[in-house]
Amino acid sequence: MIWIFIILAIPIVVGILSFFLYLDFYFGRRHHEKHMDNTIYPITTGDYQFYQLGSTLFNDMMQDIKNAKHEILVEFFIIKNDDFSNKLLDLLQEKAREGIIVRILLDRVGGFRFTYKKRSILKKAGIHFAFSEKPGFPYLFYRLNRRNHRKITVMDGKIAYVGGFNIGDEYLGKKVKFSNWRDYHLRLTGQITQDIQALFQKDWERAKDKITVYHADLSPKSKEVQSIATDGFGLEEIFIQFINSAEKEILIGSPYFIPTKSLLHALHRAIERGVSVKLLVPMKADHPFVKEGGIPFLFKMKEYGAEVKLFDQGFYHGKLFLLDHKICDIGTANFDYRSFYWNKEINIILYDKSFIEEVRTAYLKDFQESIDVNEQWYNQLNWWTKMKMGIARVLRPFL
């Protein structure tokens, strides 16, 4: 008799939970929209350096940290608990002991490896630490999905790093599963660093307390550049504007490709008016269901007439949006629902033609050496992958 009662109770319990999750999401989204904080900084000037490999990026970043004299600001989605992460933290502790202000801001969910013990060690060394986007009540389910996905490092208000790399051994290609980790990151100098520093300050103050940052004297540089900080709203519209303005070519690189209907429609229209569209995504997956969630869209893009390829020389984590040899977007935002509707992101818009050509050449080299998405590749997918594609369809708004 009790089993009959349990069986009858299951749909009732599921219904009640679904109702409360709906309310959590509905009111959480309204609260998010009311308090969201997008900032489109005006076009300014700066110099910039492009990185694809973690080894060269982190060598330069560590050297800039060693050279810092006043302040080091570090904001990441993930800092892992491994050799390189500990090496970086040791260096930051050393700088803090020298009397330099060191602040680390870490996403609460992405930073789950940061135990109380580790935070205590950093605090003892003089490092200021805070978690960003901490889940809690009200709207627990909604806030669990709200992530600070930005990766920012600023030294002395003069040098800033922004891009797709997190901190950990795997981003140096030391994890067997991914081997060669391909990503895009920027080293920026000049007036653009003021905007990135201001964004860090805003994120810190929302997470913890008011601070004063070190302001350096910065002279104008030769290249135009712009920073766009989005907070789960606005990025979709910006990307649609970019797509609608394209006349000849759109290059997209993303580890996850799950576009909204509006973006998919805009890309379709661009192809119809003669714009060449290339899309590069990874062969491997680093999160459950995300790859499977994107497969239908890869074939939809192929159907429209885009060239779509799978990077199989490691793991592709680059975030690139390049249009007509004129505009290059490199930052932290992926081409997916999570970046468009949930996450805090930062994207850097670069306008220097010689730099854009450097990035374009690097992208096309990877693109030409990658594997075509075609029916033969699809037919080789096993039953488990195809089943996960069905599950991913339901989970799409959270991928």
Image: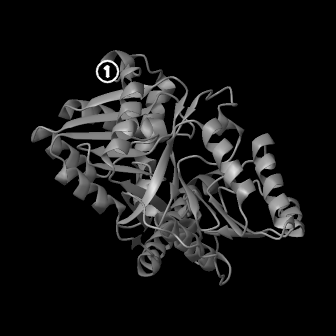
Q: How many marks?
A: 1
The image shows residue 266 at horizontal and vertical percentages of 20, 50
Q: Quadrant of residue 102?
A: bottom right
264, 130: nearer the viewer? 130
Residue farthest bottom in this picture:
210
The location of residue 167, given as percent across then percent down, is: 67, 48
Query: In the image, 135: left or right of 190?
Result: right
Q: Is residue 251 visible?
A: yes
Q: Secondary structure at mark 1?
A: loop
Disc 1: CA contacts within 10 A as few (<14), some (14-19) or many (>=20) = few
Q: Which residue is mark 1?
A: 374
Q: Nearer the viewer, residue 161 or 77?
A: 161
Q: Nearer the viewer, residue 109 or 129?
A: 129
Direction left: furthest residue: 273
Vertical comparison of 365 with 47: above or below: above
Q: Residue at coordinates 22% horizontally, 39% vertically from top-left?
A: 249
Compared across the picture, whether 125 is left or right of 238 comes to right
Q: Is residue 51 above or below residue 42?
A: above
